[in-house]
Image: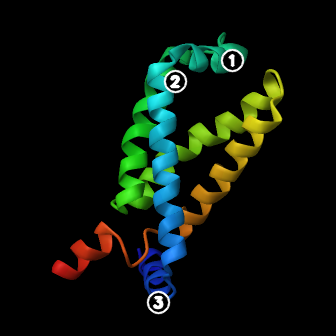
Amino acid sequence: MSTIKSLNKWANAHTYYPLDLLRIALGVFLFIKGIDFISNSQILVDLIKPVQSLAGSVIIMHYVAPAHLIGGILISFGLLTRWSVAAQLPLLIGAVLINFFGEMNIANLTIASVVLMLCLFFLLYGSGKHSVDYYLKMQQ
């Protein structure tokens, strides 16, 4: 707990608007990706095809879109950012690994890798000073 408090103090002292805009853009991107998976479920079926024989592929299909939708909204507003990012990490690691098990698509690999790195950054950095988390903390 003290580690999270020290990370929050450091992040609040070193918060910048470009980092907040990057966090918001990441959340919007994840939200749009969730909408894309819902509207074009065939894309998700094609992505999961290399690991289709594994148990839980149906669970994966029902976890990806809602996790992106809800996580994207929470990350954009800066509410429970670390928890939302932690929920995204298995999906993004899977997105990177699917490129190695299935057909290699450099564009998807690059996007998944960049989003994974951003999520790892915000897992450590948190939501920053310009977020709902900070606002609610100051209201106490």
Q: Residue at x 60, y 19 (%)?
A: 43
Residue 35 as seen in the image, left or right of residue 54: left
The picture places residue 76, in percent across and down from the top left corner, at: 40, 57
Report the residue at 66% width, 41% height from top.
Answer: 93
Residue under pointer 1: 51
Distance from disc 1 to disc 2, alpha carbons, whole Å, reads: 10 Å
Which residue is farthest top? 53
In the image, residue 85 above or below residue 2? above
Whole-percent x and y of residue 113? 72, 48
- Give residue 60's mark: 2
Mark 1 and mark 2 in contact? Answer it, CB < 8 Å: yes
Three-letter amino acid code at the position of disc 2? Ile
- The amino acid marked with disc number 3 is Ala
Q: Earlier in the sequence, mark 1 or mark 3?
A: 3
Which circle's residue, 1 or 2, is located before the other in the chain?
1
Q: Earlier in the sequence, mark 3 or mark 2?
A: 3
Q: Which residue is mark 3?
A: 13
Q: Is residue 78 left or right of residue 64?
A: left
